[in-house]
Structures are given as C-alpha cells and as structure tokens.
Image (tube, rainbow, N blue to C red):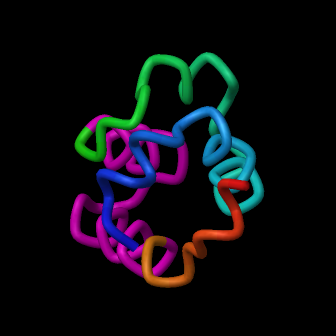
Amino acid sequence: MNWNIIQGNWKQAKGKFKEQWGKLTDDDLDIINGRRDQLTGKIQERYGLSKEDAEKQINEWQNRASDDWFH
C-alpha cells in the first residue's frame, strides 16, 4: 500500500499501528501524524532497534496493509 494512503487515513491507521507496535502511545502516534521518518524514530526508541530494522518492520507492515482497513 502506498504510504500516502496510510498518511491520509492516519486516524484509522493508528489502531493498526498499535496492534503491531503496542509500545507506541497515543501521544506518540499523534506526534508522528503520518510522517514515516517520525514513525521509524519512535519504533527505534521504544523497541531499541536500529534504523534499518525499524524500517524493515514498517515495510513489512505496509506490505500487509489493506484498503479495507480504512473503511
């Protein structure tokens, strides 16, 4: 799924992010506000991952993302 679609549907996507990365708080997700680089940084911070590992997890999540999540 294109990141622009995820960003445009951020409020709906936040629940899906919390399912995947439960250590992210509502405040974290409000601050991130759809910005992929901010999401990468917060995942790194909360999970102690390298930037590459955080990006890999986001890419995997993005590849599983489905249009029906946003209806």
From what the image shows, is residue 15 above or below residue 52? above
Which quarter shows the N terminus? bottom left
From what the image shows, is residue 51 above or below residue 53? above
Reply yes or no: does residue 2 show up in magenta: no
Which one is in front, 7 or 54?
7
Taking 41 as reference, is 48 left or right?
right
- Residue range in magenta is 38-61
Reply yes or no: does residue 56 show up in magenta: yes
Give the farthest residue toward the front.
Answer: 71
Q: Residue at x 63, y 38 (%)?
A: 24
Residue 4 horizontal/vertical position (percent): 30, 51
Which one is in front, 54 or 47?
54
Q: Residue at x 68, y 62 (%)?
A: 20
Residue 54 horizontal/vertical position (percent): 36, 63
Residue 23 horizontal/vertical position (percent): 69, 43
Examine the image and state in which quarter residue 14 appears.
top right
Examine the image and state in which quarter residue 41 appears.
top left
Q: Residue at x 52, y 42 (%)?
A: 9
Residue 28 horizontal/vertical position (percent): 54, 25
Taking 37 as reference, is 71 left or right?
right
Which one is in front, 67 or 27?
67
Main secondary structure along the magenta-highlighted residues: helix
Which quarter shows the C terminus? bottom right
